[in-house]
Amino acid sequence: MKTTLNTLNTLNTLNTLNTLHTLAACALLACSSAAFATGKHAGGHDHGPAKAAVIGEAGVAANVSRTIEVDMSDTMRFTPAAIDAKQGETIRFVVKNSGQLKHEFVLGTEKDLKAHYEVMKKHPHMEHAEDNMLTVAPGQSAELLWKFTQAGTVNFACLHPGHYDAGMKGAVAVSGAAKVKTVANPAAQSEANSPEMSDGEVKKIDKAAQKITLKHGELKNLDMPGMTMVFTVKDPALLDKVKAGDKVKFSAEDQGGALVVTAIELLK
Ligand SMILES: [Cu+2]
């Protein structure tokens, strides 16, 4: 699935939109980032395997039992916002963005979604690339296959700044009795060996767009937990040094809202 908007013009437009959204989010929350300061970084970040086990896992096409169409609109609503599923079922979500703004469909526990949303507000231009999410450009559709492995509630939301606060969220009720609980997994977090370089694994390289997708550990300088993200590279020559699958050390900076990789080293 590829919905990345690559041209600089589009990026500039999006930057403007995102800035407006950030302002809207700030107004709604009175910029009270302190209110979220407690707990978010206490203990291990459960962005690793623990989370996947709770909400389910990426589905396989051969096992799809149903297709569910979900519409995302600029009224900041998902239609439908309430979805039923059965434990063990693999659903093909066909997610359409009928609005003019970029929206995303992210599955997660409410706790994970809120934590990610706070990161998105700090870094409005970040591009995620996780299995449990889709970013859909205006007028486009995208597909996500997901297997619901546990009974309970799996939430979903659009984490673009302002959208979640405006109510862009929903839930999948997975039949069964147990309520889904988030399990902290301190062991999943890798230690950063250097204050400047972070650990990462190259998932994808797009030389034309000067972008690299990295599954990374905690980025201490950006106050960001481990996840998979698309970064812009400062110097396209950096992309000649690595390929998909490589384990690397890298440095990333927030440059005017864009997350930019400034250095990358191959780990042998
Ligand atoms: Cu949205």
Image (spheres, grey):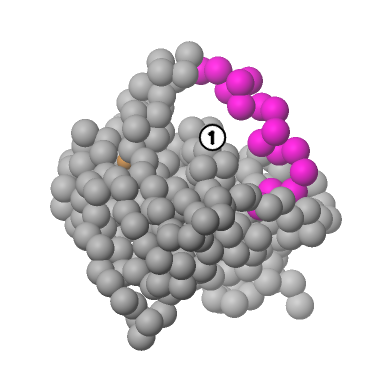
Question: What kind of element bears circle 1?
Answer: helix
Whether the residue carrying mark 1 lies under 8 Å from ligand 1 is answered with no
Q: Amino acid at mark 1?
A: Glu
On the picture, is 129 further left or further right than 252? left
Position in image of residue 215 (x %, y %): 59, 62
Taking the magenta stretch, the answer to whether it contains residue 39 is yes
Taking the magenta stretch, the answer to whether it contains residue 199 is no
Residue 16 visible in the shown view: yes
Position in image of residue 137 (x %, y %): 25, 52
- Sort mark 1 into few (<14), some (14-19) or many (20+) by Cα contacts within 10 Å: many
Position in image of residue 181 (x %, y %): 61, 50
Residue in the image at 63% along x and 50% along y: 182
| Rendering quadrant holding ligand 1 | top left
For the magenta stretch, what is the residue range?
31-46
| Quadrant containing the C terminus in the rendered view | bottom right
Seen from the viewer's position, the closer of residues 39 and 251 is: 39
The residue that label 1 is drawn on is 118
